[in-house]
Image (cartoon, helix red, strand yellow):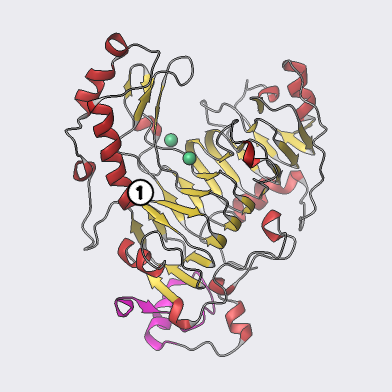
Amino acid sequence: MRATFRKRSFAFVAFGMFALLILSLSFAFKVTSSAGAAADPGHQVLPANDGWAAANGGTTGGSAATSANTYTVTTRAQLVQALGGAKSTSTTPRIIYVQGSIYGNQDDSGNTLTCSSYITGGYSLSAYLAAYNPSVWGRTKKPSGTQENARAASESKQAARVEIYVPSNTTIVGIGNNANIIGANLLVKSANNVIIRNLNFQNASDCFPQWDPTDGSSGNWNSAFDNLSIFTNSTHVWVDHNTFSDANQPDSSEPSYFGRIYEQHDGECDITKGADLVTVSWNIFSNHDKTMLIGSSDSLTSDAGKLRVTIHHNEFLNTIEREPRVRFGQVHVYDNYYNETANSQFQYALGVGKSSQIYAQNNYYQVPSGFSAGSILKAFTGTVIYTTGDIVNGKAIDLLAAYNAANTPHLSASVGWTPKYVTTVDATSLVPSLIQGNAGTGHTLTA
Ligand code: CA
Ligand code: CA
């Protein structure tokens, strides 16, 4: 089957130049020197000291791949094949270049699958709404029975399509500024040493949201698929220069049922269940609600000592919450640009969850006029966060003091650690222009 995709045995001389790529495909340049290889993002590795993913040996992804395990993919089927097959547990180094758009909802022949393609067990939204209407079902227990079983089975069918597992020692990198992962959930599960760069992650959308009347005070519609999930003890993951969004299916386009928005998205980049040593750098997280969850449950005490993540030089643009929300982890959040000026739905940036130890440094916040700086932090069951060097709407501010002036119980600054794996911390005043000129996809990648 490998014959069905083009192997890359040539160097990127100037990554991101599509015209040159076409030339390269025509002439099939060979990699002739290590200098040539170094310019190729497929062979780049996480720089020394660049966040938690640099600890304990660093992150090299698939950079050691042979030409036989180097691929350019243009379809979902090719991507899965290049990854070693569905739910591959291979540890063979592999470099995968993504060209154009990969659609999660696509069959192996390249045909588009719609939500109706996955329906099984007699599920219908109208029957589901009728069965679990609070006036019928009440608000004290989660849905169960025929329609809920059918919803779950239909969602599982969609999962088998849109969930794409990334094994250990893999680099996936988009070509140019238009490499898209659309309607899919990349999963790094029980995998080590993975690099994911220069991809536009768009609209991982669940066709079968679940109603939970017990979630919050008014109930919620919850969905299954993140754009990118890093979980189940995965380590050494570098997520760099990607752009995440709900794209053409923003929450504002969704209907409401039972008085709550019919939410078809989950996280943009969720890091959970014992994942550790992750660096998230130079990405744009945009137009989304539950942006980044680090640690998924207060009761998952095995996460203690894990979930160590560095989040630097990212833009959060029109995102509502969880930027990130943290449980347990020692998380360094620095030089990020929170660009929320026009976002009337903005709720908070940093969520202080159970046993979290966030060290937040030199972040630049632009919040809507009238939004209180004391609400940029939000405490769940956490008790500590260290903040320094922040600017809110152009003014230097002590974010923790602002929080404590507005909220009780107070949070303490005693997080008990200091970040060790750091390259350059930029001055906060420089952050907006630095991020807007360099974050997200379509930039020349270096490492
Ligand atoms: Ca959403
Ligand atoms: Ca999630």
Does the beta carbon at disc 1 come under 8 Å from ligand 1?
Answer: no
Determine if the magenta segment contains residue 16.
Answer: yes
Helix, strand or loop at mark 1:
loop
Determine if the magenta segment contains residue 238.
Answer: no
x and y, in percent, of residue 114 in the image: 22, 46
Residue 100 lies in quadrant: bottom left
The residue sitting at 46% across, 52% down in the picture is: 187
Q: Is residue 185 above or below residue 293?
A: below
x and y, in percent, of residue 78 in the image: 33, 67
Residue bearing mark 1: 183
Q: How many marks?
A: 1
Q: Which residues are magenta?
A: 1-28
x and y, in percent, of residue 144 in the image: 31, 24
Q: Quadrant of the N terminus?
A: bottom left
The residue sitting at 57% across, 54% down in the picture is: 234
The residue sitting at 80% across, 53% down in the picture is: 420
Frontmost residue, 12 versus 168: 168
In this picture, residue 255 sits left or right of residue 362: left
Q: Quadrant of the C terminus?
A: bottom right
